[in-house]
Amino acid sequence: MRRVLYLFFSSLMVLALTGCGYNQLQGADEQIKASWSEVVNQYQRRSDLVPNLVSVVKGESKFEQDTLTQVIEARAKATAIQATPELVNDPVAFQKFQQAQGQLGGALSRLLVVSENYPNLKANQAYRDLQAQLEGTENRITVARNRYIQSVQSYNVTVRSFPSNLTALVFGLKVKANFTVENEKEISKSPRVSFDAAPGAAK
């Protein structure tokens, strides 16, 4: 009899959790983790390209050192932040992550634009290869970031909607941080440079 009652109440609990959005919340949370992991991977890929890019650019003896310094410092700040899955639950930490990545993206864009003024550097095959890899990575970052944004939006709507909001309250589930509009405008600027332009004519 006790076993029957146990099974009965267990079944009721499963039905209750299913009906109040528990499974939906868990599924959405897993999607966010997967999306976030891809965002981090692509940012790491970009960061890994920086040392080689800096090394090649240093070969141009008269290259603007301030621009190189900005890239090096921005990369150091970006890589200093541990982009763990828990970071998306901390709005302050997430904002710092956004700012650091935005600064690195901006510094790289400036470096590529300034490089337009150095014909020898533009003709360097190693530089051209790195520039192409960097542009491809920026495109992948944009795709990964958009997927993350969509995942978080779906999750946050579920957390705020009735009756799943009650389930979220019981289990301590809160809305997750997302990329801000202001930050999105900054980090979505891919560092694109046309090698067909005349020296000194940056795009």
Image: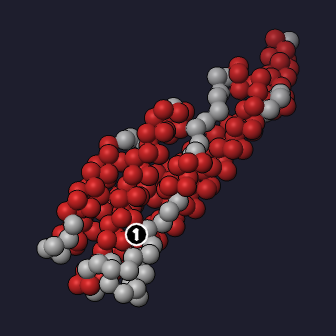
Depicted 135 relative to depicted 66: above or below? below
Q: Nearer the viewer, residue 115 or 8?
A: 115
What residue is shown at x 48% (from left), y 39% (from top)? 95
What residue is shown at x 23% (from left), y 84% (from top)? 120
The residue furthest left is: 61
Q: Nearer the viewer, residue 166 or 194?
A: 194
Q: Nearer the viewer, residue 12 or 27?
A: 27
Depicted 103 relative to depicted 20: above or below? below
Residues packed near mark 1 inside 10 Å, few (<14), some (14 to 19) or many (20 plus): many
Report helix, strand or loop for mark 1. helix
Corner quadrant of residue 20: top right
Q: Position of residue 121 (x, y in %)?
A: 25, 80
> Looking at the rendering, in which quadrant would you find the C terminus?
bottom left
Q: Position of residue 196 (x, y in %)?
A: 41, 88
Q: Position of residue 8 (x, y in %)?
A: 86, 20
Depicted 159 relative to depicted 182: above or below? above
What residue is shown at x 36% (from left), y 64% (from top)? 110
Please count the marks in the image: 1
Q: Is 173 situated left or right of 58 in this image?
A: right
Three-letter residue code for mark 1 = Leu
Depicted 101 relative to depicted 189: above or below? above
Q: Is 181 situated left or right of 158 in this image?
A: left
Q: Position of residue 147 (x, y in %)?
A: 62, 55
